[in-house]
Image (spheres, rainbow, N blue to C red):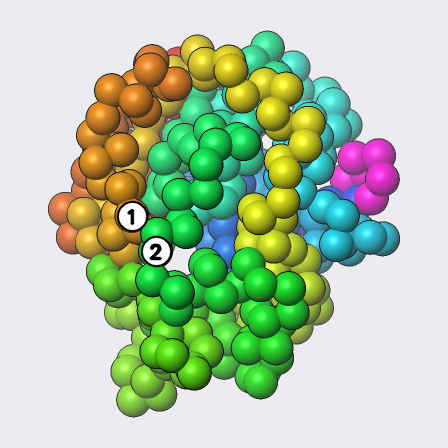
Amino acid sequence: MDKILHKQVNVGELNLHVAEIGSGPAVLLLHGFPEIWYSWRHQIIALAVAGFHAIAPDFRGYGLSDQPSEPEKAGYYDLVEDMVGLLDALGIEKVLVVGKDFGAAIAYYLGLCHPDRVKGIVTMGIPYLKPGGPDKWDSAPKGLYFRHWQEPGRGLADLGRFDAKAVVRNIYTLFSSSELPVAEDGKEVMDLYDPSRPLPPWFTEDDLQMYSSLYEKSGFVFPMQVPYLSSKRDPGRLTLFSDRTIQAPCLLIMGTKDYFLKFPGVEDYVNSEMLKSAVPNIEINFFPEGSHFVQEQFPEEVNKLLLGFLNQHL
């Protein structure tokens, strides 16, 4: 880990923190929430050893990257354009993209909006969801974490009752389960946390300290904006591309114990022709016993799948 280079890269409006290592074909690794560049700690070293240039940024508003001046106006498209700016700044014409959680959406949208910059896409935890499509979560339980945090101010108030370390511990513990995080009436999502429940065995106290130190720096204002609050708004410029298909070769890795499969209609959608019509060159791999954090839970096995796909699409 001490060989990883950390730097700030200007992408136009702001600077992004980037962790990178290795040389060779570029691989862009996009984190989710409550993650950060560090969530790829098991992948970036393996990629470098295998002859790749691994690049793991913190999204704007996350970790060591700059906060946008008007976070309430930001959406997914801004993060897509940040990634284009990052590639331009690093002199990279075309890249292999790996995304996890809402980072998977950014990976897909990068391939959708800028197909000339993408060689292939690997995603974990979330399939491709067409921008501007119907809100699939309106039929979900009212206490579902995603619906709670889509309400202005509610997520920040919920998380604000705890320090950053407790928030990360709570979410990693809750979201590594196979059950949907659903709060009872009159309760908030963080009230689901059981302090007697230990951290997942693959997530150490040192990992928790790294995450919490980065969220202490960034806070949770922007993480509540993207992905949660912005997902209720019109996706704006993304709708200009919504009728396109993603032609790049894609690999979707889903843990069989990933709670996201229990979102309304998701499991059927993942196995449907509807997904394959939007992403015709997709391969789907269900990872036995894998949780929403499959790349941290089973790093060696995931790295084998990842490297196998990447080497096919250099």
Residue 304 percent across, percent down from the top left: 27, 34
Q: Characterize the local packing of mark 2: few (<14), some (14-19) or many (20 or more) Cα atoms within 10 angstroms.
A: some
Q: Amino acid at mark 2?
A: Ala
For residue 168, above or below residue 295: below
The residues tagged by marks 1 and 2 sit, at their Cα atoms, a distance apart of: 6 Å
Start-end of magenta stretch = 7-14
Residue 286 percent across, percent down from the top left: 19, 38
Q: Is residue 196 left or right of residue 94?
A: left
Q: Is residue 278 left or right of residue 22?
A: left
Q: Is residue 248 left or right of residue 78?
A: left
For residue 188, above or below residue 127: below
Q: Specify whether residue 11 is painted magenta.
A: yes
Q: Which residue shows up at 32% across the image and 85% down it?
A: 194
Q: Amino acid at mark 1?
A: Pro
Task: Tell me if residue 128 can be seen.
Answer: yes
The reply to whether discs 1 and 2 touch (Cβ–Cβ < 8 Å) is: yes
Viewport quadrant of the C terminus: top left
For residue 108, above or below residue 172: above
Q: Characterize the local packing of mark 1: few (<14), some (14-19) or many (20 or more) Cα atoms within 10 angstroms.
A: some
Q: Which residue is mark 1?
A: 264
Q: Which residue shows up at 79% across the image and 35% down it?
A: 11
Q: Which residue shows up at 32% across the image and 32% down it?
A: 252
Q: Which residue shows up at 68% across the image and 64% down it?
A: 221
For residue 91, above or below residue 206: above
Q: Which residue is mark 2?
A: 140
